[in-house]
């Protein structure tokens, strides 16, 4: 343990001198006693200004550092205080740790890296810290990223969406950048006040540069956007509009299934046979939802079976596909296709689709804008998929801020890298 230069390299601490290393076998730990390099001036931890020493502070402090083999590593050092001209009396700036943190910067970085890439249980087991502690680290790491980059710079086309978590009991409002695919911002709740937070951070100058906003048809979003983003065209999010049709189709399918079941029990056929048509219908959900180009041969056969046996359900299927076509062709062709679709839906005699047509008419302007601006839902959808994944990963976080920090780190374009790698 005498060759401290090996230890200094191994610990990877800049501006630190390793004075001693001791083993604490009963704790399975190594403690490295270090001090800030002599030549390095004492600096205020708040503003990093060179400052004269004030006192010893609270004596020695310990930080958890990256493991060495199977052992935990702790760094121990004195943390004296300085008298800063600007901030008053403060602890000194420690190059390997943030003020107030119990872990080194490298340790935080490794945890942030893992938290954005692997499961909760893997992180907890590998790193040997509580999940609650893991939750605080992305927020700290994110602050560093925020200090280096302006995430709100150059935003032109954004999407605003709501995401349910905690089994639909809680919501996040998220803002994505359509041009980069990045998650720009996330806040808790789904109301005007949530969005106001975002507009406040954005400020009027950058708000004026936003030319396009896609959102679902929630009225509060439309009103807030109108108020704060004066130059933005509001587009309906194609994904949400198609989802209306998918929901309507699902309703028709359930009705068909119930009818088949009722018919079967009325005629009192044997159990085996009576469940034939209703069971067959029950298994059609996936085939009906999928895009025709993604159907398997078996699912194709199912759709053909529906066409023969249940014209009403088949009509509902074609209506759903028709609406998808509108957003596929986009532009003037898409607008014309939507006119035809609305006329078709109006006389389809299926209440669920008549209702979809009514909803489309109320937000027609924003749908036309989406068709005109060729807004793709693929980006919004891919970010949503990733966020849903994170909500699953992060279900143990009691604090939504921890979830938001993790989501922004993973999807904000500045994913953490491992310490000591170039
Ligand atoms: Zn200071």
Image (spheres, helix red, strand yellow):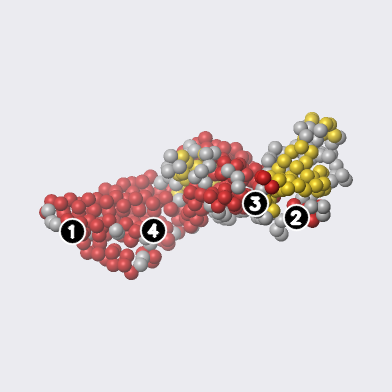
Tell me whether the residue at label 1 lies in contact with that at label 2, contact meaning CB atoms closer than 8 angstroms: no
- Nearest the viewer among 210 and 15 is 15
Return the disc, 1 or 4, that comes first in the chain's sequence.
Answer: 1
Residue that mark 2 sits on: 10
Q: Secondary structure at mark 3?
A: helix
Mark 2 Cα-neighbour bin, 10 Å: few <14, some 14–19, many ≥20: few
User: Spatial distance from mark 1 to mark 2, Cα to Cα?
Assistant: 70 Å
Tell whether 7 sits left or right of 330: right
Q: Secondary structure at mark 4?
A: helix
Mark 3 Cα-neighbour bin, 10 Å: few <14, some 14–19, many ≥20: many
| Mark 3 sits near ligand 1, with its Cβ under 8 Å away | no
The x, y position of residue 168, in whole percent, is 42, 42
Mark 1 Cα-neighbour bin, 10 Å: few <14, some 14–19, many ≥20: few
User: Spatial distance from mark 2 to mark 3, Cα to Cα?
Assistant: 15 Å
Return the disc, 1 or 2, that comes first in the chain's sequence.
Answer: 2
Tell me whether the residue at label 2 lies in contact with that at label 3, contact meaning CB atoms closer than 8 angstroms: no
Residue that mark 4 sits on: 324
Which residue is drawn at the image coordinates 29% and 58% (left, top)?
283
Residue 272 bears which disc, if any? 1
């Amino acid at each position: 343990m005498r060759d401290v230069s090996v230890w200094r390299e191994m610990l990877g601490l800049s501006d630190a001198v390793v004075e001693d290393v001791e083993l604490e076998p009963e704790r399975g730990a190594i403690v490295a006693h270090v001090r800030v390099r002599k030549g390095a001036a004492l600096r205020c931890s708040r503003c990093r200004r060179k400052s004269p020493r004030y006192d010893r502070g609270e004596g020695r402090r310990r930080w958890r550092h990256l493991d060495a083999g199977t052992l935990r590593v702790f760094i121990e050092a004195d943390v004296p205080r300085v008298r800063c001209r600007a901030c008053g009396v403060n602890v000194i700036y420690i190059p390997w740790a943030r003020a107030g943190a119990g872990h080194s910067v490298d340790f935080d970085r490794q945890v942030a890296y893992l938290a954005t890439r692997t499961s909760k249980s893997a992180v907890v087991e590998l790193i040997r810290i509580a999940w609650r502690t893991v939750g605080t680290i992305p927020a700290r790491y994110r602050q560093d990223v925020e200090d280096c980059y302006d995430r709100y710079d150059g935003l032109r086309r954004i999407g605003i969406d709501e995401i349910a978590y905690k089994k639909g009991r809680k919501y996040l409002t998220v803002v994505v950048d359509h041009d980069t695919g990045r998650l720009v911002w996330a806040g808790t709740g789904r109301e005007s006040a949530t969005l106001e937070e975002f507009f406040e951070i954005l400020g009027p100058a950058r708000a004026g540069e936003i030319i396009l906003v896609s959102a679902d048809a929630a009225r509060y979003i439309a009103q807030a956007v109108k108020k704060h983003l004066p130059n933005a065209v509001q587009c309906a999010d194609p994904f949400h509009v198609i989802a209306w049709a998918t929901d309507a189709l699902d309703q028709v399918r359930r009705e068909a299934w119930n009818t088949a079941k009722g018919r079967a029990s009325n005629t009192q056929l044997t159990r085996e046979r009576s469940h034939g048509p209703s069971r067959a219908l029950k298994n059609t959900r996936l085939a009906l939802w999928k895009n025709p180009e993604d159907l398997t041969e078996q699912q194709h056969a199912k759709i053909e079976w529906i066409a023969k046996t249940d014209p009403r359900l088949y009509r509902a299927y074609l209506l759903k596909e028709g609406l998808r076509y509108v957003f596929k062709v986009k532009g003037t062709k898409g607008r014309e296709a939507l006119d035809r679709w609305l006329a078709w839906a109006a006389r389809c005699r299926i209440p669920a689709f008549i209702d979809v047509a009514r909803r489309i008419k109320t937000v027609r302007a924003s749908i036309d804008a989406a068709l005109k601006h060729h807004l793709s839902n693929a980006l919004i959808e891919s970010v949503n998929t990733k966020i849903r994944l994170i909500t699953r990963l992060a279900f143990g976080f009691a604090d939504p801020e921890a979830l938001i920090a993790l989501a922004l780190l993973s999807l904000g374009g500045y994913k953490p890298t491992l310490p000591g790698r170039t």
